[in-house]
Amino acid sequence: MDCMMVKQLIGPMSDAQLTQELDDAVTLHCLTCPQCSQELHTQKTMRTLVHNHLVDQSLVVTDTYRSRCMRRLNDRFPHFHGTASVSANQTQYQLPIQLEES
Amino acid sequence: MQISYEHRLIERFQRGDHKAMELLVDHYIDGLLRFVIRIVGSREDAEDVVQDALIKSFERAYQFRGTPSSFGAWLYSIARSTALDRRRQLRFPFAQMTLIDDISAPVQPDSNLHALLWSAFERMSEDDQTVLFLCDAENMSHADVGIIMERSTAAISSQLYRARRRLRDEMARVKEVTPWIA
């Protein structure tokens, strides 16, 4: 495997998207090639940096906003109310008359 | 969320199961907000966009025959196009938008590395930012990001590779011209 091919595989490798066989081949190449080894290191480092610093996990929706979304969805799909989990008493949605069996 | 489980939830939704819709909303809503807020720039606008995107997605979910893609990718794709429409209405370029409101608040205000990364990230193109955010920050698969950005999986892998290199180069450049970052 030459450097050109390895460079194409380094990105997917740092995302764990290679087969074991290809992963091993890239690893083997990087052991003896300082340039590719450096490139692999860069890709892994940048991935870790972005993951650790760019996501603000504290940025979540509020309960009020979630309720507002669910209310709008309920309004848009009113026929779903019969199975709504917000209902503690499912029987209130039963039909008021008994349908005849055919 | 595993695709097989997600597809079962979609099937339940298509049969009229409200609980399935709730579970899908709960699973995706926080990530969607974080994604959209980067595009439109303010929490208020992002909340409107996410709400619209959820409604559009569930309206179209009756036609969803997901295999092999995930509903999440589909949902993010709708959210992205809705957000881009909103941004066009607001008439702000992407780089300016990312500097305002909630998203400029640093997670670790004392970290030079954090500040350096943000400065470099804000100078990158929208496509680079999106691919880095979805693949590396939100851990989405290249295939799903391909659906969201309407590109092939191979194109996303290649763009991600180049985006990481550009981010590294940009960080090095910002560090050179910003003495306060040690």
Image (tube, rainbow, N blue to C red):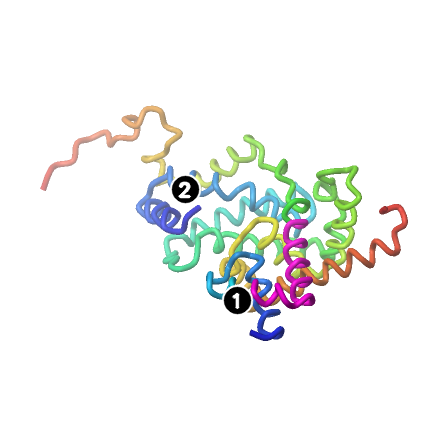
| Res A25 label | 1
Which chain's residue wears label 1? A
B136 on left or right of A76: right
What's the residue at 71%, 56% (across, down)? Answer: B94
Q: Please, what is the dominant secondary structure of the magenta stretch?
A: helix
Number of residues whose C-alpha sits closer than 10 Å to that of mark 2, classed few (under 14), some (14–19) or many (20 or more)? many
- Residue A102's place in the image compared with A9, above or below, is above
Q: Name the one closer to the observer, B150 or B128.
A: B128
Q: Residue at x 16, y 35 (%)?
A: A99
Which mark is in front, 1 or 2?
A: 1
Which residues lie in the magenta part? A25-50
Seen in the picture, residue B145 relative to B99 is either above or below; the reply is: below
Q: Chain of mark 2?
A: B
The amino acid on which the numbered mark 1 sits, given as a three-letter code, is Ala
Q: Are marks 1 and 2 in contact (CB under 8 Å)?
A: no
The residue labelled by disc 2 is B21
Q: Give the Cα separation between the discs numbered 1 and 2.
A: 44 Å
Residue B174 on image: x %, y % = 83, 55
- Disc 2 is placed on an element classified as helix
A94 or B179: nearer the eye?
B179
Residue B45 point in image, percent of width and height: 64, 45
Q: Is residue B82 above or below residue A76?
A: below
Give the camera-side residue of B156 and A91: B156
What residue type is disc 2 on? Met
Q: Is residue A40 magenta?
A: yes
**Residue under the point 17% across and 31% down:** A98
Q: Residue at x 54, y 44 (%)?
A: B51
